[in-house]
Amino acid sequence: MTLSRRKQRLGALAAAALAAATVSTVALTSAGAQEQDAGIAQAKVDNPYEGAQVYVNPQWAANAAAEPGGDAIADEPTGVWLDRISAIEGNDSPTTGTMGLKDHLDEAVSQGADVIQVVIYNLPGRDCAALASNGELKADEIDRYKNEYIDPIVAIQSDPAYAGLRIVNVIEIDSLPNLVTNVSPRETATANCDTMKANGNYVDGVSYAAAELGALPNTYNYLDAGHHGWIGWADTNPLYDNFNASAALFGSLIGENGMTADHVHGFITNTANYSALEEPHWEVDQVVGGQALNQNPNVKWVDWNDFNGEIDFSTAFRDELVANGYNSDIGMLIDTSRNGWGGPDRPAGPSASTDPATFVDESRIDRRFQKGNWCNQAGAGLGERPQVAPEPGIDAYVWIKPPGESDGASEPIDNDEGKGFDEMCDPAYEGNIRNGFNMSGARGEMPLSGHWSSEQFAELLANAYPPVN
C-alpha cells in the first residue's frame, strides 16, 4: 500500500490533539471516491484494500498523537471495536469512546475514506478460554446477540448514505478455534469452552453475523482464524490436530443461518496478538544438531509446530479453508499492530550454537516465553505498517488492534464492562497448561482491556520494526 504523506481531516474530536502534527493517512489512489461521495453503491472487488484510503479513527489518533513521538503513526488506520451493545450507539466508555458506529461511518465519509474496519466482538460467552475480555452476554443469550447486537449493526451498515464505503467486518476474534483446542477431552479444556461447544452458540452467532452482514452489497467479512502459535499443529491424532480441525469447523458454518461461502470474503490471523510474520534467521524444519527443529522434543519454543510465522501459516490455512468449502479467491488479513519485535534485543542473525534449543532461543525475534502468551507482552513493538497485498493470497497487513490499548488488567479492577481478571495478564503468573506452564510475560500496571496505556504505547513505538522515523 502506497503511503501518501498529506494532511488528513480527522474530525473535531481529534483536531485539537493533532493540530501541531503533520498527519497523513494510509492512502492509495482513491478508486471509489466519486461513488463514495455520492453514496452510490460500488460493485464488490476482489481486494477491498486495493486502491483504497482506509479510515483513521480520530479517537485513537488523538490518543496516539498526544504521546511523545506518536504523531509519526497517528495517521495509521486501526479497527473500530464494537465490544458491547451500547458501543453501537456510543457509550462514552474508555474502551470505545464517544463515537458510535454511525458516527464512525459519517466520519469515514467526511474523510473521503474508501474502507472502514469494524470489529464485531460480542458473542455470548465470549473468550471462553480467557477472562480479561469476557463480554456482557451470558453463554445462553444468543437471541440478544442476534436481535440487540447484530441486527442494529446491519441496519446501520445498510444505510444508503454509506453505500460507497467498503465496510470490512472482522468477525468475533478468539472464538471458534477455542471449540477445537480448549474443549474436552483435551487437557487444555475449560468449562466455559465446553459449554459453548455444547450449546452451539459460537457457531450459531458467527454464522448469523456473517450471513446478515455479508448479504449487504458493500461489506467484506473476514472471520478470525487464530494464529500459528495456536492453530499451527496438524496431526492424525485428533487430540493434537488444531490446523485441519479448525478449518473443518469453519467449513461447518456454511449452511448455518443461511450463511454461504459467498458471505465470507476471507479470514484474519494474529488479531490482537504478537506472532511474527516470519523468523528471518531460521526455518521451522531446519536441521540443527542432526534433527529438524520441529521434530525435536527439546525445542520447547517450536513444540512440533508446523510453522514459525504468520505468512506461511496464513497461506497454508487459506488453502485448507478452500478445501473445506470456501471460495478459491478468499483473501487473508494479518494483524501486524504489535508483532515487530524490534529494538536493541532483536537478534541480528542466526545463533552459532549447535544445540537446537539454544539455537532457536538465540535466533528468534519473537521474544515471548511461549507462543501461547497473549496479554500485554513486554518487549513487543509495532510491526509492519498497514499495506495492501504484501504477499500472494494476503489482502493486507492491518492494524486491527489499536496499539496502546491494553489486552487486560494486570490485577483485579472492578468494572461495569463485564471484564474479569485473567492471571495471564499478571506479570508474576507462572502459567498453566495452555502456555506450557511458562511465565506470562505480561507488563505490569496495565488497565482493563481496551483502555489506554501510555507506557505500553511508548514501548511499542521504541521497539517498532521496521523502525518508526
Image (cartoon, rainbow, N blue to C red):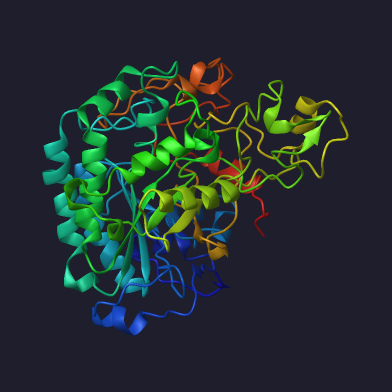
Give the answer, above or below, for where 36 lies relative to 287.
Answer: below
- Residue 336 visible within the image: no
* Quarter occupied by residue 219: bottom left
Give the answer, above or below, for where 117 lies relative to 148.
Answer: below
Which quadrant of the figure contains the C terminus? bottom right
- Residue 172 at x, y = what percent? 33, 43
Give the answer, above or below, for where 24 lies relative to 185.
Answer: below
Viewer-proximal residue, 57 or 283? Answer: 283
Name the residue at 47% across, 52% down: 318
Name the residue at 72% across, 42% down: 283
Viewer-proximal residue, 355 or 349? Answer: 355
Residue 457 left/right relative to 11: right
Give the answer, above or below, for where 155 lies relative to 459.
Answer: below
Residue 437 left/right relative to 408: right
- Residue 2 at x, y = what percent? 56, 72
Name the residue at 28% across, 58% down: 263
* Quarter occupied by residue 33: bottom left
- Residue 71 at x, y = what percent? 55, 59
Name the residue at 38% across, 22% down: 421
- State how many labels appear: 0
- Residue 351 visible within the image: yes
Which quadrant of the figure contains the N terminus? bottom right
Viewer-proximal residue, 235 or 50? Answer: 235
- Residue 288 at x, y = what percent? 81, 32
Residue farthest along the bottom direction in this orientation = 34
* Quarter occupied by residue 31: bottom left
